[in-house]
Image (spheres, rainbow, N blue to C red):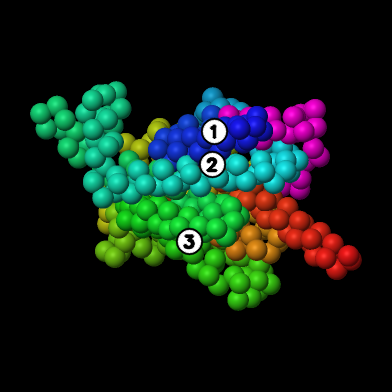
Amino acid sequence: MSRRRLALLATTAWTASGIVLFVLVPLICPALLLLGAAAPAGWYRAHTGRLPLEAPSRVTLILILAGAYLAINASWSLSPGSARLALAALLLIIIAVHFTMSALEGNDADVLRAILAGVYAGMLIGGTVMFFETLSDHWLRRTLMSLVPALRPKPADMLLEGGRVVFIQHHLMNRNVAAMTLLFWPTMLAAVQLGRRHLYVRLAGLFPAAVAIVGSGHATSKVAFIGAALVFAVFPLSPRVMRRLLAAGWIAGIALVVPMATLAYQSQLYLSPWLVHSAQHRIVIWGTTSRLIAKAPLLGAGIDTARALNERYRDDAPFAPGSDFRMTTGAHSHNVYLQAWYEAGLVGAALMCALGLAVLVSIARMPPQGQPYLYATFVTGALLGGASFGLWQPWFMAAFALTGLLAAAGSGLAARSQAAGDVSASDSAHP
């Protein structure tokens, strides 16, 4: 076997191991994002003799501008230490994204195919493990917790019998499910770009991951998965209309999130019996947060102030009328758009809006055959951001970055395949 072939297999194995780790241990995603740059950067250097430092894209420029603004914004945070840590994580992620994206754009089809094969293999393995965990009531995790007490959650989230963990709360798997949900559509694109041979077998291999997502207890991931599936199905019917609708929805979601959160709270939707307990609590969190935005509407209250406020007042805050939910900003804001408004102000919300629109414009310039998967990926991230986790959590920021890079790898291979097809058609037309 040639050295190049061995190197391509190593690239596939390297990528697959990273995907498996991301699905099973999402919190280490920032490290995986940095380590994941090694393979494409190594191939790029082997081809060009230099490091992959190309001119930044429009998306990267907006991220740099956001980082510069947030560096100032962090100075008035209620929690300067955690604000600086979040900012440092964001800056490292921006550098990793630019470095890796430059490398991906400079690599040939074989390298991209090896990376995508690793993405598919990793999701196949990780999705199958999560499928088994879902059906077995998290037997693997419970077994590991029984053997290694350091892995156990707080007592309120588990049940012990005879020194063994016999039950854990389903919300402990929410990050894992969210990771699978983010990866699903880039993996679908990878499966398609790996060729028509055995395509249906590869697509069937993603069935366990889909079942694990739908069968999980993470409602936000289910909504994101179903919403993205609808976009994927409808997009080919009228691509131009769908592009406009997605752009309008992105703008409206950011522009209207504050009045919508306020209205939901003032209407006391948190008392609605048809909402699950966690959704009721989030409405109180959103209502409380939206009321605070008026104190610093332009520049915001500072990175991670919402979490600091919650830690300071969570035990003394009044209850929302008629409920047992305290009126706090929550340990997690559970809505990145509302959190951007509160902590980064109008400037931060405008930057977030510009970033999303820049991503949508970039997708519109990608090869048509890959666009349904890319838009589905965008919708997945947009919906997950609307009702889960916090904006500044390093693993969550890195998860969005990793997802975007994997989608870009699939789109890059589609572009090279399209270019090769155009060349072949041109050659056959001019004998």
**Horizontal side, residue 151 vs residue 193: left or right:** left
Q: Is residue 425 left or right of residue 282?
A: right
Q: Relative to the observer, which residue lies in front, 212 or 150?
A: 212
Disc 2 target residue: 118
How far apart in space, not on screen, are marks 2 and 3 (Cα)?
A: 18 Å
How far apart are the two marked residues, 1 and 2, measured between alpha carbons?
7 Å
Local crowd size for mark 2, using a 10 Å CA cut-off: few (<14), some (14–19), many (≥20): many
Q: Main secondary structure of the magenta part?
A: helix
Residue 45 highlighted magenta (yes or no): yes
Q: Is residue 92 covered in magenta?
A: no
Q: Is residue 32 visible?
A: yes
Quarter of the picture containing the C terminus is bottom right
Q: Nearer the viewer, residue 370 or 292?
A: 370
Where does label 1 land, which residue? 14
Name the residue located 60 percent from the left edge and 42 percent from the top edge.
114
Where's residue 21, x and y in %?
A: 45, 35
Q: Mark 3 falls on what kind of element?
A: helix
Check the picture and name the quadrant holding the N terminus: top right
Q: Are marks 1 and 2 in contact (CB under 8 Å)?
A: yes
Looking at the rendered structure, the secondary structure element under dot 2 is helix
Range shown magenta? 34-61
First in sequence, mark 2 or 3: give its number: 2
How many residues crowd around disc 3 within 10 Å: few (fewer than 14), some, or many (20 or more)? Answer: few
Which residue appears farthest toward the bottom when viewing the image? 237
What residue did someone put label 3 on?
A: 200
- Amino acid beneath label 1: Trp
User: Of tags 1 and 3, which is closer to the observer?
Assistant: 3
Is residue 350 visible to the viewer in this orientation of the structure? no
Relative height, residue 416 to residue 53 (above, below): below
